Image (spheres, rainbow, N blue to C red):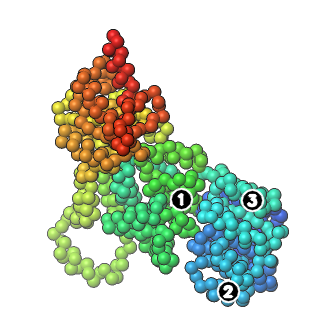
Amino acid sequence: MKTFEELGVREDLLKAIAELGFEAPMPVQEKVIPHLLNGDTDVVALAQTGTGKTAAFGLPVIQRIDVKKRCPQALILSPTRELCLQIGSDLADFSKYIPELKVLPVYGGSSIESQIRTLRQGVQIIVATPGRLIDLINRRTVSLENVHTVILDEADEMLNMGFLDSIDDILSHVPENRKMLFFSATMPAEIAKISKKYMHNPEEFVIGTKNEGAANVKHIYFMVQARDKYLALKRIADNNPSIYGIIFCRTRRETQEIADKLIEDGYNADSLHGELSQAQRDTVMKKFRERNLQLLVATDVAARGLDVNDLTHVINYGLPDDIATYTHRSGRTGRAGKTGVSVAIIHSREKSRLKDIERKISKQFEHKEVPTPQHIIEKQLYSLADRIEKVKVNEEEIAKYLPGVMKKLEWLSGEDLLKRVLSLEFNRLIDYYKDAPVLDIISNDSRGDKRNKSDRNSDRGGDRGGDRSLEDKDRRTADKGYERIFINLGKSDGFFAPNLIELLNKNIHGGRVDLGRIDLLSGYSLFDVRKSDASKVISALKQADFYGKRIYSEIAEADKNYAAENKGKRRSTRNEDMRKKATSGAGDRRKSSRRDDFKERDRKPRGEKPAYGNYESFNNKKNKKGKE
């Protein structure tokens, strides 16, 4: 491995980075620095966030500056104010022993008059967000005619934030023969197009694999019901007492709600989203960087530019639509050679998106069960014991209080005293996790490439599923304590056991419902619930819909030898009457992708809702029996 000196870094810069703790170049620095110092071509460097990119372009840029000229010679564009400030701060640290060098961060949310005054005094390096720099250009207070190096940091993020037109405008004011550098964590097609447009035969450096997730990050997922995501989040946090991480949510509203719940439940947390003022954002980020916050709940846009090196976890409360966004999220942990964990809390309908991410980042997610209360309590107590063991004791100050305390507690043995100290934490955990339910969706799919057990059973028409005990799993329709429910959703609607379970959990409030047998057919389904829950289930589903299709359900007053158990046998007249009643007048006419499954019945008079079609499977069997 080469040293920074062997890469060609100058003596005054070597002295500064040595004081910052730089020992040996990181891979991106080893590849990029010599090229920027000696090469003539433009550069596209693909590397994850936190791999040392700032030093990779910062050191050679500083070295190439002519400090005798007091005009902008290098321009660094960043997508966010926070990243702009971070880069400016790092360059100032690198140039500690070059007093003539002036670096100016230019960004929105700060006094433009102050920035103009500094520009007039003369600066050699400008670090800017696109919007504020265009404002200064339009005011004719900054000239870029002497810029010889332009760097786009987090180029893919700038594209995601819609800065393409702004970049066009800025580059029109920069000399044509400038050297350009693109630094990006991912390589979407748009980056390739821009590199062709603005660069001259760029050389590409890839650290790791293109679009790959960070090498030091472990990717795991927990599969729970949608309504149990917050409970799973709390257990993950409790199971990692030293957690220091970011929880990513999809919307501002969800971000604030999750942060409020965590704070209410006693966690050291706060939110970061677009509705906060700049002063509020600065306060939150300052607290998080100083580790006064353990958990930061954020949207993707708000967290851009937040540079923190010691995150233990990144938690995806909801998977992003864009796979590149997941790469950025996970890349915030496992930095600077350290390991990190990227957690995804998902429900069954997000499995396909998880697989897309796996293919893109060339990493496999490990399926884990949500930590049990017993495991959490054990982890917390060992953590408390560890803190007791390592706590720093101020012997001099505590000495004056010890005699009185020891006299008060002298009747306790060492074991009794230890029990009481641990119980301060233990009792709280026991009370909280008393009768806590199992949150996982039961699955034989530890890798995620096999279907849920309930999905496999559903294809045989005899599937069992739901939030129920092991005893309940073996119950059949014949059990006197269960009632059979008809629902007008089946396999042709893309409706399977996990969908039923999720539907019930989402719409039924005030406790879980124990499910018995589930029979899934092409155009409808039958499932068993306890008789005491039957009316509650039907009432809850009245106002529900499944991807736009209005749901109809009722108690199936049928023989016990029904549906899949006696497939192909003659149904009773009573069952046939119930079918006709259930499949007519239940809502808007259903359009099926499987036309052979049913035929339309006569329409009702105009002005009334059209009736559902009766399924051909019923009519064909009925006609066939009549002919026989």
Distance, label 3 to label 2, CA atoms, is 31 Å
Mark 3 is on which residue type?
Ser
Q: Secondary structure at mark 3?
A: helix
Q: In which quarter of the view is residue 295 placed?
A: bottom left
Q: In which quarter of the view is residue 397 placed?
A: bottom left
Q: Residue at x 33, y 19 (%)?
A: 622
In the rendering, at what x and y percent does residue 567 appear?
Answer: 33, 21
Left or right: residue 462 versus residue 202 is: left
Distance, label 2 to label 1, CA atoms, is 35 Å
State the residue position of label 2: 116
Q: Which of the two residues, 564 or 272, is positioned nearer the viewer here?
A: 564
Earlier along the polypeptide chain: callout 3 or callout 2? Answer: 2
Mark 1 is on which residue type?
Arg
Q: Quadrant of the N terminus?
A: bottom right
Which one is closest to the eye, mark 3 or mark 1?
3
Q: Residue at x 27, y 47 (%)?
A: 540
Q: Residue furthest top?
A: 628
State the residue position of label 3: 195
Callout 2 environment at 10 Å: few (<14), some (14 to 19), or many (20+)? some
Callout 3 environment at 10 Å: few (<14), some (14 to 19), or many (20+)? some
Which one is closest to the eye, mark 2 or mark 1?
2
Q: Which of the two residues, 318 or 391, is positioned nearer the viewer here?
A: 318
Q: Is residue 40 above or below residue 507?
A: below
State the residue position of label 1: 329
Q: Is residue 379 visible?
A: no
Earlier along the polypeptide chain: callout 2 or callout 1? Answer: 2
Distance, label 3 to label 1, CA atoms, is 24 Å
- Total marks shown come to 3
In the rendering, at what x and y percent does residue 471 appear?
Answer: 24, 35
Mark 2 is on which residue type?
Ile
